[in-house]
Amino acid sequence: MKLFQKIGLVAVLSLAVVGTAACGKKAAAEQPKKEEIVIATGAYPKPYAYEEDGKLKGFDIDLAKAVFKKLPQYTVSFEKTEFPSILAGIDTGRYQMGANSFAKSEERTEKYQFSEALYNNPMGIILPKDSTIKSFDDLAGKKTSGEPAVSYSVLIEDYNKKHTDNPIKLSYTEEDMVKQFQNVENGKLDFKLESIIIANQVIKDQKLNLKTVEVPQGTVDSRSAYSYFVFAKTKEGKALAKKVNKVLDSFREDGTLQKLSEQYFGKDYVPDASEAKE
C-alpha cells in the first residue's frame, strides 16, 4: 500500500475512534443524573429495624429497599444513627427519609411529612403479672421510663401537660428495651408503654414474668395506631413521599406488604387503603 494511502487510512480510523468516543461522551452526558437519597434509621427495635451480621434488616428496612427498587431515578443509601438524630437530620437536609416505625403525633405532623400508614401498631401497657392496672386511665401517678424523643415518651409528656395534678412519673433513660422491661419485672417501674408486637416478642424471647394490656385505638389522641416513613415537610419531601406512596399502594394490592408483615410480625397488620390514607 502506498504511503499516502496508509496515512489516509490511519486518519479515517482516527476520526472514527474520536467520533465514537464523542458519541459515547454525549450519550453519557445525556443520561439523567440520579438523585441521592439517604434513609436514616436507629436500627432498633427488632423486628421493625435492626442490624444483624453488619446488615440492616427488618420490616421498615426491607420495605424501603423494595420501594426504591421501583424508583430507579434515585440512588439510595442507609445511615444508622441514634433515634433522636433521625428527625434532626431530616431538619437539616442530611437525611431525606426516616425508616424506624415512626408514629404520628400532633407536634410531628405539624413539622414533618408522613407516608401512608405501613402497618397497624397497637400500643400495649407492659405490667408485672400481679399488677392491678387495667387501662391507660390507671397510669396516673405511676412510674415508668422512656428514651428521649421516642413516641411513647412524647405521648406521656403530652399526657402530663394535661394532667398536672397527678402526672405519670417519667424518667428518661438510654437503657435498652429489655433492661426497661426487666425493671418492670423487678418492681423498679410500675409499667412500660410499648407496641404489642414488640412487647409480646420481647417477653417471649427473654422469658419475662410480665403481661400486656392492649390500649384500644383512640384512647390517646396524640398517638397514632399506625407506623409510617417520615420525610421533610418541604416541596422536595412532599414530592418524594408522593412517589413512595404510589409504590406502597401497588404493594398493598399485590400482597407485598402482607408478606412482609407476616414474615416479621407473624400476623397481617397491614391497614386497608382507606385506613392507610387517614
Image (cartoon, rainbow, N blue to C red):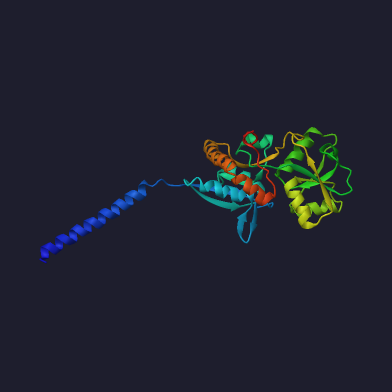
- 63 vs 117: above or below: below
Q: Is residue 219 above or below residue 7?
A: above
Answer yes or no: is residue 131 visible: yes
185 in relation to 124, above or below = below
Q: Is residue 195 visible?
A: no
- Image position of 127 (left or right of 153): right
Q: Quadrant of the N terminus?
A: bottom left
Residue shown at 22% from the left, 56% from the top: 15
**Residue 278 location in percent, x, y?**
64, 33
Residue at image coords 60%, 44% = 255
Percent x, y of residue 108: 65, 37
- 204 in relation to 227, above or below: below
Q: Residue at x 61, y 41 (%)?
A: 230
Residue in front for this viewpoint, 61 or 200: 200
Q: Position of residue 28 (x, y in %)?
A: 36, 50
Q: Nearer the viewer, residue 67 or 161?
A: 67
| Residue 6 image point, x, y percent | 14, 64
Is residue 127 toward the left or the right of residue 237 in the image? right
Residue closest to the eye, 273 or 189:
273
Q: Is residue 247 left or right of residue 24?
A: right
Number of numbered discs: 0
